[in-house]
Amino acid sequence: MEKIALITDSACDIDEETLKKYKVHVLPFKIIYKEREYTDGIDITPQEVYINMKTEIPTSSQPAMEDIEKLYQKLQEENYTHVISINISSGISGTVNGVALISSQYPEIRTFLYDTKSTSAIQGILVKQCGELIEKGIEFEEIVKAIPEMKKKVHMYFVFGTLEYAIKGGRIGKISGTIGDILNIKPIVSFDDEFGQCYTCEKIRGRVKSINRLIEMGEKYTAKNKCDAYVIHGNVEEDAVKICSRLRMNPGIRNVYLIGQISAIVGVYCGPGTVGVCYAEV
């Protein structure tokens, strides 16, 4: 009989209730300051990271190999036969490679490792959907086949509060970013499917207009199919609540979920003031 474990990493943005309900194993990133190293989601919160960015912008490192090893040892002891691991894009982190290396040392546990080519809410929604299928008793092979199709139906867009943190984190070109801040350009950002890296969908001048466009972009999906919308933010809950209210006015949106703070590891690069909406076709 199959016993399937569900793994992700702390870049995954979904509510704690979902993680607990489906017994998701979360591999934590490290948040690194000059004086101390923290474990993402364990001894530092996203809000603390955003507040601390006023004085110091931390760096980060992927989940430790020993943490992945300990997790697989635990799964082996608990007689798991299969693993589905939904992870941050290999285009921005080596986490996928780390899990691949450790899982290869446990051939008795069959592992399906999925590179989301994305992160944050997309990662979280895929984890949630896999958890639902596991709970229903769907077989491992069927779930594995379904995941790529599930990914095609999830679409995420961000607006940064400022381009400063993306520039310092090396996520966008320095010159275009500097000019963008001077001209008050607020680009709509997403992830490309080929390399799993950030790219600019549209360049909008001004925060209000950029948020309006963020909401409008979902209409191309809701015009064809019903969608659920997931809203995340970088320490700007008031903006996120307003976005939720406006999304609920769209008859093509079935449910609106305010997930809350963007994870600390993603927040290191997008910074405070960021808002994001993920549209999941149902």
Image (cartoon, rainbow, N blue to C red):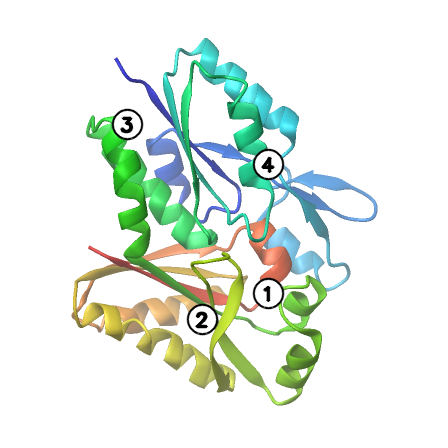
Q: Earlier in the sequence, mark 3 or mark 4?
A: 4
Q: Which residue is mark 2?
A: 239
- Which image quarter holds the N terminus? top left
Q: Which residue is mark 1?
A: 272
Q: Quick one: 98 or 262, which is closer to the camera?
A: 98
Q: Earlier in the sequence, mark 3 or mark 1?
A: 3
Dot 2 falls on a residue whose secondary structure is helix
Question: In the image, what residue type sits under mark 4?
Answer: Ile
**Residue 85 makes an appearance in the image:** yes
Dot 3 falls on a residue whose secondary structure is helix
State how far apart marks 3 and 1 are (Cα): 39 Å
Expressed as whole percent of the image width and height from the top left, the position of residue 200 reads 50, 74
> In the image, 212: left or right of 97?
left
Q: Which residue is mark 4?
A: 42
Q: Which mark is residue 140?
A: 3
- Which image quarter holds the C terminus? bottom left
